Amino acid sequence: MMAPSSCAPRRGGSGLDSAGACPFLLPPMHPPADALLAWYDRHARSLPWRGSRDPYRIWVSEVMLQQTTVAAVGPRYARFLARFPDAAALARAEWAELAEEWAGLGYYARARHLHRAARAIAAEGMPRNAAGWRALPGIGPYTAAAIAAIAHGEAVVPVDGNVERVMARLFAVEAPLPGARRALAELASGFAAQPAMRARPGDFAQALFDLGATLCTPRAPACALCPWREDCRGRAKGIAATLPRRTPKPARGALHGVHFALAAPDGRLLLERRPEGGLLGGMLGLPGTPWRPTPWEEAEALAHAPMAGVNWRPLPGTARHILTHRELHLRLYAATAARLPPRAEALAPREAARALPAAMRKLLRLLGPQVGFTGA
């Protein structure tokens, strides 16, 4: 018998202890890959990035899809490729161009890594396997494996949240995430031993994505329609819908900030580019205070105003925006000025709404029908 490479379920159990460790090892019994591929051939989703083996296009789609819904990415993907059709075009672009195109998609560190990686590709060439992709800035194991499987036909299994959920249910892994993550990835990689998977690794990866997104959903999984229903240990034990288990997350901390909408007589708003490091790094925004855990008093906030000697008015309301681990609470002061500072970046409110990230767009909504801010 070959030495097992992953933590396999004991008959009737999960194979993992409560800490996610492997108290014993047995060869995992994986369901047939060809059953999933046959299902995929009939039910594959039609998505804008499907059907291409171009690694650049696949890479862009995978980066866009991180922490963003398929529905939101679809129209933005086509627009992005029209502006940056290949890695060379993206490498030549200035950061401001990419930041403008990425505005509203969130998780802006993705765009900064994308830009740096494109410049590395322009200098060193396009990677040809998962290891090569993994060496580029901002590309983790999942993205590298997805590109390698779909574009290069490498027999690797990319593991995202959908695939983790499928594996947890398929093998009845009751240990909670994130501790069980490594074992779930090992279980997924076990499919690479099957000839059917090795013949179509890209389709197999996308079949797993579709299975998790359409049938093996977080709530109310459609087990009766699943091609692996007879092999699913979670279903057999009646616990599929409760998996994967998760360790409770700590409460999301709040950050407070005050921003300033300074308008010229023609209605253009003063903007500034945020520092490269930190939240919304490198993106355009309204000038303001740093973000901190405690609210700002008016006097200390006004010390950060972009111009003194104007009548700053606090506007009613607070812009709330949820980030991965933080919740922003942002207030807004408004004023008009005879002229903006020299060499300042400024846009009309409607143009700003297209160029700014979502948190800043929520601040613009606080302007309402204020005098001097028509069109906001």
Image (cartoon, helix red, strand yellow):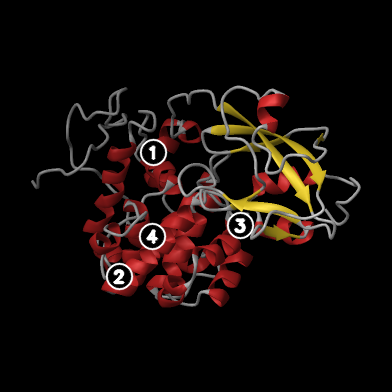
**CA–CA distance in space, label 3 to label 2:** 33 Å
Marks 3/2 in contact by CB < 8 Å: the verdict is: no
Which residue position is annotated with label 2? Answer: 153
Judge whether residue 243 can be spotted in this image.
Answer: yes
Marks 1/3 in contact by CB < 8 Å: the verdict is: no
Q: Nearer the viewer, residue 225 or 362?
A: 362
Q: Amino acid at mark 4?
A: Ala
**CA–CA distance in space, label 1 to label 4:** 16 Å
State which quadrant residue 314 falls in: top right
Q: Earlier in the sequence, mark 1 or mark 4?
A: 1
Marks 2/4 in contact by CB < 8 Å: the verdict is: no
**CA–CA distance in space, label 1 to label 2:** 25 Å
Judge whether residue 225 can be spotted in this image.
Answer: no
Marks 4/3 in contact by CB < 8 Å: the verdict is: no
The crowding category of the residue bearing disc 2, from other C-alpha atoms within 10 Å (few below 14, some 14 to 19, many at least 20), is some
| Secondary-structure class at tag 2 | loop
| Secondary-structure class at tag 3 | loop
Q: Nearer the viewer, residue 358 or 69?
A: 358
Q: Amino acid at mark 1?
A: Ala
Q: Amino acid at mark 2?
A: Gly
Q: Earlier in the sequence, mark 1 or mark 3?
A: 3
The crowding category of the residue bearing disc 4, from other C-alpha atoms within 10 Å (few below 14, some 14 to 19, many at least 20), is many
Which residue position is annotated with label 3? Answer: 103
Q: Amino acid at mark 3?
A: Ala
Q: In the image, which is nearer the foreground, mark 1 or mark 2?
A: 2
| Secondary-structure class at tag 4 | helix
**CA–CA distance in space, label 1 to label 3:** 35 Å
Q: In the image, which is nearer the foreground, mark 1 or mark 3?
A: 3
**CA–CA distance in space, label 4 to label 3:** 29 Å
Q: Earlier in the sequence, mark 2 or mark 4?
A: 2
Report the disc number at residue 168: 1
Which residue position is annotated with label 4? Answer: 205
